[in-house]
Image (tube, grey):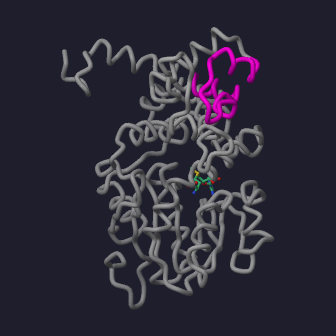
Amino acid sequence: MTDAPRGVPAPLLLHEMAFSLGVTAALVAAVELKVPDALGDRPAGAAELADRVGADPESLEQLLRALAARGVFQAREDGRYAHTPASRLLREDAPGSRRTMVLLAGAPFAWQIWSRLTDAVRTGTGVCEDLYGTDLFTHLEKNDPELGALFDRAMSRSGEATMRPVVEALDLPRAATVADVGGGHGTLLSMLLDRHPGVRGVLFDLPRVVEGADERLVRGDLSGRCRVVGGDCRRAVPVEADVYVLKNVVHMWDDATAAGVLRTLVRAAPAGARIVLVEQVLDATATPGSATVMDLLMLASQGGRERTAAGFARLLARAGLPAPRITPAGPAAFLVETAVPGAGVSAAAPG
Ligand SMILES: C[S@@+](CC[C@H](N)C(=O)[O-])C[C@H]1O[C@@H](n2cnc3c(N)ncnc32)[C@H](O)[C@@H]1O
């Protein structure tokens, strides 16, 4: 009975897992009430915090207790609560704040999608067509722009922490043009342009999304080195670049769709251009718990998947691309890098 992780007896392990949706709900309640923002550097009791956020004191105590049991807030012996690194990251003003990611992860549409996971596993396809009559991103654009805006904000804000190691790991030639395909509002691209003053950039994403692109790229100090292009990468990527970055993009789709996107990209790309997928690698990750849950979310939402190293090689081969070189970029991402074959380019991934 004790071969479960951390020696937790199997019945307790299952109990904890089965009710873990309550943890998502608790995080959402805390950020919706802005409890992390109401707690400063000085510890505070539940009654005081309840007064600040407009909540019922005893109920807020229950909420804080549940979160503190998981390392979000610290329950002190004097009965007051203090911040932990995790609860601080839920503040609106925290660098790399996870606030919007929590709101997205626990938004009603996410519960709807999760509630249909069995169907997705049975059929191998995502449930958004069934739920909304269209794919997720068309739904965000046509039916629920508010949710679309939350999605975009969550990507650009909470990606910052995972983007820093990517920026450090990605080697760019001095005068290269780098295109971020599915780059959202351009947080990663801005960070790349900041780090490489000779590099030019292209931000490519759906028209609805690039409308909200980072002001620095559109009108600000980086605009002279950056172009912003709206489009659908399943149809065309009208962008010529030396390096194409796709971060957390191909995991949204099954192999047929993802290979189609890559073939479309290759049609526009010059021979020798590098293609860098920034993704989880299931058999190499240090965080298999969250990677495998994300794998299921991708499946349920759009029939997508996280991939193993062999899975990436298969995907790239299907798109006519050489096997990748895979390098870690921080604790939760890898650079999966290949190159567009052509004159003077070896079939090997760039070295
Ligand atoms: C999971 S998000 C990743 C965003 C960003 N690369 C990051 O890592 O934070 C996927 C991105 O792909 C974009 N996207 C989805 N379908 C697309 C399409 N057909 N064409 C272009 N971009 C698309 C979304 O708008 C979104 O910005």
The residue depicted at 45 percent of the width and 76 percent of the height is: 171
Q: Position of 27 compared to 15: left or right?
A: right
Image position of 151 (left or right of 105): right
Percent of width and height locating residue 173:
49, 84
Q: Nearer the viewer, residue 336 or 266?
A: 336
**What is the residue that sits farthest to the bottom in this orientation?**
344
- Which of 333/86 is in front? 86
Asked whether 243 or 200 is in front, the reply is: 200
Task: Mark yes or no: residue 21 visible.
Answer: no
Q: What residue span does the magenta drawing correspond to?
A: 25-54
Where in the image, quadrant-wise, is ligand 1 located? bottom right
Is residue 40 one of those drawn in magenta? yes
Q: Position of residue 240 (x, y in %)?
A: 60, 79
The residue sitting at 52% across, 17% down in the picture is 78
Magenta stretch: residue 128 in it?
no
Give left or right: position of 157 versus 267: right
Image quarter of residue 93 = top right
Q: Left or right: where does residue 55 sit relative to residue 268? A: right
Answer whether residue 254 is visible to the viewer in this image.
yes
Quarter in which the C terminus is drawn: bottom left
Q: Position of residue 250 (x, y in %)?
A: 49, 55
Image quadrant in which the N terminus is located: top left
304 lies above or below 20:
below
The answer to which quarter of the image holds residue 328 is bottom left
Image quadrant of residue 43? top right
* Residue at image location 33% in from the left, 68% down from the top: 325
The residue nearer to you, when weighing 287 against 140, is 287
In the depicted structure, whether residue 86 falls above or below residue 348: above
Query: Measured from the top left, where is residue 145 in percent x and y?
Result: 77, 42
